[in-house]
Amino acid sequence: MGKFLGILLSCIVAAALVEAAARLVLGPPNPPGVLVFSENPFQISPGDVMRFRPAREIRALSVFGTAREFDVRFKSNNLGFVDDLDYPLAAKSRNIAIVGDSYTAGYHGGRPWVPRLRQSLPNANIYNLGVTGTGFEQFAALLDDVAATTALDQVVIVAISSDAVRRSWRYFVHDGRLFLCARQTPKQACLAKPSNILLVDAKGSEAALAARIDAHHDATPSVGLRRYLSRHTHVGQLFHTRTWRPRSKALDTIEVPAFTLAALKRVRARFAKRSVTLIHLPEKREVLAGAYAADLAGAAKAAGLRFVDGLKACKLTVADYFPRDPHPNDVGYEKIRICVAKALR
């Protein structure tokens, strides 16, 4: 027993020394990240579909402690999509809709990439239907909503593996935080869930912003020892499962649910005589692993859609994503723009 306690004490002392050295070199570890918007960015359209609030300039920040992964402003047009131009666009030979989640909204690097596709395809109208946090059910609903007033000749779904398990959702605002929950979730049950999406005064000072983030962290409920160590120490982060898996290139599998396949078939039926392509973009963890977590290629084939493997075609590297935030940076989005442009030619 004494030998065991001696070994345990030695391990604790060694861990403390490693932690002290890490803090001396790297500084204290950053707390969990928060996403900050200058206002609630979402609004439900008359067709009961989630979009951004129309005709706005919205500030978005991803903050980890004192480090900002991005701090950008993006504009929404008259219909609540990320674009400098209002819809519908002036008539051209082709109308192409690009639908997807935040990777398609693409504002994180400071220059939304879908509107810039017009440089590569001057004879086509490009519609950016990317909305943060959406999945395939909402992709189908967005396309239905827009196609009711705009004749679309071609549809491109730009998706990531995580989209496969996202149900249609709604939002609630409470106590300066934004809560996103599946539509069937009651309001009180939604508000009981944790939220790291903060809403701040667009005209507030930097000091007020920092104080708001600090207050959010201070109010975060206490957690178990393992999670506390993973959040607040370098040693804990090193050995935490979610940190170690990317380091070891392990990848959790995501099964494509029936509701996602049904949404893809709905899109195929809605645009039966037109070109519909699914481009699967890799998330950072998938770039590191060299494989996808979800089989969207199989889902596209089952629904009768053309498929483009973005892991191979877009040549993204880990450096094309922010260090902590999961989104691509400006270089990554430019690679995505070029990749999608090639797929459309």
Image (spheres, helix red, strand yellow):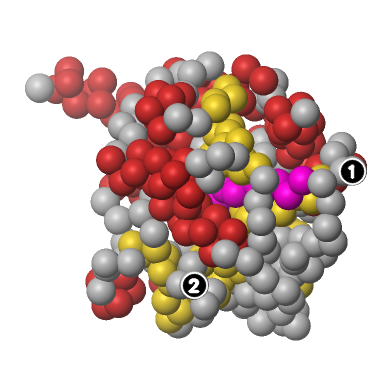
Q: Quadrant of the C terminus?
A: top right
Report which residue position mark 2 lands on. 47
Q: Residue 10: horizontal and vertical position, in percent?
A: 33, 24
Q: Say which residue appears at 44% left-offset and 44% top-offset.
A: 269
Q: Determine if the magenta segment contains residue 45.
A: no
Q: Front-most of 271 and 128?
A: 271
Direction from residue 176 to residue 331 in the image, left or right: right
- Seen in the picture, residue 192 relative to 132 is either above or below; the reply is below
Q: Residue 74 at what x, y percent from top left?
A: 75, 63
Locate residue 70, reporting x and y percent: 71, 53
Left or right, 22 with reference to 14:
right
Asked whether, in this view, residue 228 is left or right of residue 98, the answer is left
Count residues near mark 2 (Cα–Cα under 10 Å), then give few for <14, some for 14-19, many for 20+. Answer: few
Q: Is residue 99 magenta?
A: yes
Where, quadrant-wise, is the N terminus in this rendering?
A: top left
Residue 5 appears in the rendering: yes
Reading the image, the residue beneath label 1 is 122
Is most of the magenta stretch helix, strand or loop? strand
Residue drawn 75% across and 66% down?
A: 87
Res. 282 visible in picture: no
Amino acid bearing label 1: Pro
